[in-house]
Amino acid sequence: MDNEVTALTVLFTEFYYWATVVIMFLIHVGFCMYETGASRHKNHMHTLMKNTMLIPVVTITFFFFGWWIYFAFPNGPGITGGLIDSPQAEPWSPLMGPHMGGGADELAPVWARLNGVFWAAFLLFSWTAASIVSGAVIERIRSTAFWILAVGIGSVWWIIDAAWGWHPEGWMVRLLGYHDAYASGVIHAIAGGYALGVLMVLGPRIGKFSADGTPRSLHPRNPWLVTIGLFLIYTGFWGFYVACNVPIFDVQSGDGVFYSATNIYLGPTTLSAITVNFLMALSGGLLMGYIVSKGDAYWTYSLGLAGIIGASAGNDLYHPILALFVGAAAAVVTYKLHFFVERRFKIDDAVGAVAVHGYAGFFGVVIAGFLLWGYPSSPNPEFASVNPLGQFIGAVIMFFVLGLIPGWITAKILSGFGLLRIPREIELMGLDAAAMEAIRRDEEQLIEIEREMVRQLQKKSA
Amino acid sequence: MTTGSFQNWAGMIADIGPIYPFVGSEMLLWIIAVVLWIVWHVVQAKRENRQYQDEIARFGKPEALRQIVDKEDPSNP
């Protein structure tokens, strides 16, 4: 960094991504509140710890191999080429640690500054993917199983789909014209599909379905915690959106220079565009969600999120009113499909995660194929342009091929070893039974001490 | 003695590469960390199994379970 323009560009980009990581942290705070509020009192602590501890297991595995997958797998490998040499992303690379940029590698000055913040931004997406699954499986999954599943979705499957459909050179972008600027499919459809695959093996909570198969409503135990959690997820989502952009990049091909913010594919967009579209899509989801759920607070909030997720694939390019309509349509699709799948297939998705993320994400990818038909999928003019068939195939790859199937297979293996579901007695007594018993004993001791003090005071006053 | 690959900030900073200690040991650190990660899952799985066995022994009898379920009933004073 031997001149001021380069230094300012790189240091601004470094700070920009650092800020997105801080904001995105709120997504996880929100997920923890939301999930704990949806669980029964006897499962609160276990539910909280299940989600909290995905942070370290996904973080370390994303360092061990996840980050490398993103740079090494854009060709498949085996579809448009082999593995791509990615020395800066190998976990033993000096550029993964504190580094001043010196050395023989000409990209070292840039990677030394940006590798860590890029890694962290992608890592926060990984947490989100795992956290989406976490909510669906509450109150009956073993922590052992969930944390293995979290490593699968957070450090393997979603980052493969990012290499295929989000990397500027990904084979899906190149061959299918796949466009998914803010991760309708890349994060949400895959995580929703993965959760559905796990739920198919895990089964419903005790009492969710009556003997004739009619579903019962197990309402959130703490609606305030749930809705404030969803508000925090909205807040963290701003960081998510911003992290999907490159803040300053020369987008002019050939002669000349033109600096702009770009989407994840390095195609030009503006921060203004995504700011307006985020809010309009949220509004579409909330307005329609309020109507279809008949004013139910839990579902109205959830469908606001579904509105954003549904519009995300094309929110770098949509007109704001289009984002509003897509968000509203996503809310209807999400709500109707959730209850249809619950009734028809007896799937107990405890927080509606499969619907809000999976179905809304799938819908968002497909609808972008029609609304952005003919648009360039990336700045490379040799790549396929956006089209409905390419987007539909992309949505199927995200939801089913990299989501549902790996989730189902992993859950089957864990179930085969007796590691997936908690014993029935534990489910009845609650996952916090021993902890609650210890708290009760401590409280009793404390109360006994207080009673003794009161007795002494009574004696004195007598 | 020094554990780092540089001893002061004098000279050309642009020539300085990694600034963490024990440069060259990254692969070894990675192997140790991966092994410890796997060990953590094994230890955690055993601990969770043991915990469930203990809890079923303490609270898993039908009468004890009935009392726990009764406590959840909001109509139960």
Image (cartoon, helix red, strand yellow):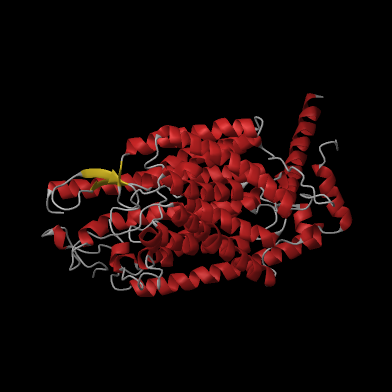
Q: Nearer the viewer, residue A253 or A71?
A: A253
Could you tell me residue A443's position as x and y percent?
73, 43
Task: Tell me which residue sits at (36%, 72%) in the image.
Answer: A83
Residue A128 visible in rendering: no
Could you tell me residue A135's position as x and y percent?
61, 50
Name the quarter where the N terminus of chain A is drawn: bottom left
Task: Tell me which residue sits at (17%, 50%) in the image.
Answer: A6
Could you tell me residue A103's position as x and y percent?
18, 66
User: Taking A372 as reference, is A462 left or right?
Assistant: right
Corner quadrant of residue A166: bottom left
Q: Nearer the viewer, residue A66 or A368?
A: A368
Q: Nearer the viewer, residue A441 or A361?
A: A361
Most distant residue in the right direction: B63
Corner quadrant of residue A328: top right
Task: Tell me which residue sits at (56%, 30%) in the image.
Answer: A287
Corner quadrant of residue A423: bottom right
Task: Tell me which residue sits at (35%, 48%) in the image.
Answer: A375
